[in-house]
Amino acid sequence: MDLLQEIENYIQEAKDLSVSSPEEVEQFRVRFLGKKGIIPALFGRFREVPPEQKREVGQSINTLKNLVQERVTELKSALRSTSSGHSYPDLTLPGDPWLTGSRHPISTVRNEIISIFSRIGFTVSEGPEIEDDQHVFSKLNFPPDHPARDMQDTFFIEKESAADSRNDVLLRTHTSSVQVRVMEKQQPPIRTISPGRVFRNEAISARAHCIFHQIEGLYIDTDVSFAQLKQTLFYFAREFFGPKVNTRFRPSFFPFTEPSAEMDVTCQICGGKGCNVCKYTGWLEILGCGMVDPNVLEYNGIDNEKYTGFAFGMGIERIAMLKYQVNDLRLYFENDLRFLEQFATDLW
Ligand code: PHE
């Protein structure tokens, strides 16, 4: 065989070689580079090569030699880094940190509130954020001249005229709109809570935001009473804030409930003794509630002779502020990791 062809075959063999143990690498090395190996033998035969071929053959032998050396180093290190090799990675190296995320505090509080109400039979209902006048105002007994129907309070997407609001499209200002949607579709008994984002045309400050979250509840059945409303919300307050909390109800007004009330809980900062957060009253307002106005039942196709109901609604940020004692609302919306990382243990 032509010497050049022979060298070419060795080059191919060296390129194709694959091994599974260090012993095989050593065999390969000795076969080519050992004293009696292929490469010294080729150099031996070099003397017989006619002068006009010396240059080409010499280059070929060198290529083969370099290739074999490279392959030996390469195969050795490949074996070292696989588990079939006999060495191990450096177990004393520090590990790669595993970054865990955390729940947003608003999600944590929302989930906790949902869990408390689902334990007494409330289901979760959701609805659209872009709503119409019917679901946000009209079917909830808002009079035509109510200030919430004003551009100053509500974000309108399409507004007809001050005189005719029937076709207005707007961002919902409360999740009571979801309860209207539930009543439209379902006859009592209804026992549902509606968590979600709501929008109000407010200047952003530490205490107000144009976006926030609510959870509203609705219970309709035969013989639903104000006493049941109070007991349900008392249960909620104790589950959420702990067994020492007290509640009180103050008369209030909402177009969709009659009678209406606001519920206060013992101030979570001072425990009821009086501090600047509760303005020295010992109480903090956390929600609005009341008996569903019979008009609302009627507008939504529910027999108001047969059924009564109660409703309540609370702001999630407000509850979160009490739980975490973070008193600037804006922090809940900025997504600053330094803020969010503080809640990393709340993996609820
Ligand atoms: N929808 C009211 C609000 O947004 C809260 C509320 C709900 C009050 C149900 C009473 C009954 O402020």
Image: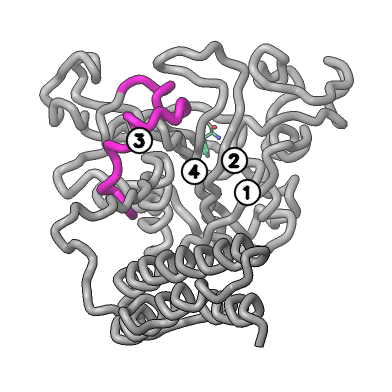
Residue at left offset 35%, top offset 80%: 25
The quarter in which the C terminus is drawn is bottom left
Q: Secondary structure at mark 1?
A: helix
Which mark is first along the chain, 3 or 2? Answer: 2
Q: Is residue 328 magenta?
A: yes
How far across and how far down the image is residue 47, in percent?
Answer: 50, 72
Q: Quadrant of residue 106?
A: top left
Q: Secondary structure at mark 2?
A: loop
How far separated are the C-alphas under marks 2 and 3?
26 Å
Q: Amino acid at mark 4?
A: Ile
In this view, the residue in front, 121 or 309, is: 121
Dot in front, 3 or 4: 3
Contact (CB < 8 A) between labels 4 and 2?
yes
Label ID, residue 42? none
Upstream in sequence: badge 1 or badge 3? 1
Question: Distance between the Cα atoms at labels 2 and 1?
Answer: 7 Å
In the image, the residue with mark 1 has its CB under 8 Å from the nearest atom of ligand 1: no
Pair 2/1: label in front: 2
Q: Position of residue 179 (x, y in %)?
A: 63, 48
**Residue at the spot of label 4:** 215
Q: Is mark 2 within 8 Å of ligand 1?
A: yes
Q: Residue 183: horizontal and vertical position, in percent?
A: 68, 54
Indicate which label's residue lies in the foreground, 2 or 3.
Answer: 3
Helix, strand or loop for disc 4: strand
Evaluate if marks 2 and 1 touch, with contact meaning CB atoms under 8 Å apart: yes
Q: Which residues are magenta?
A: 327-348
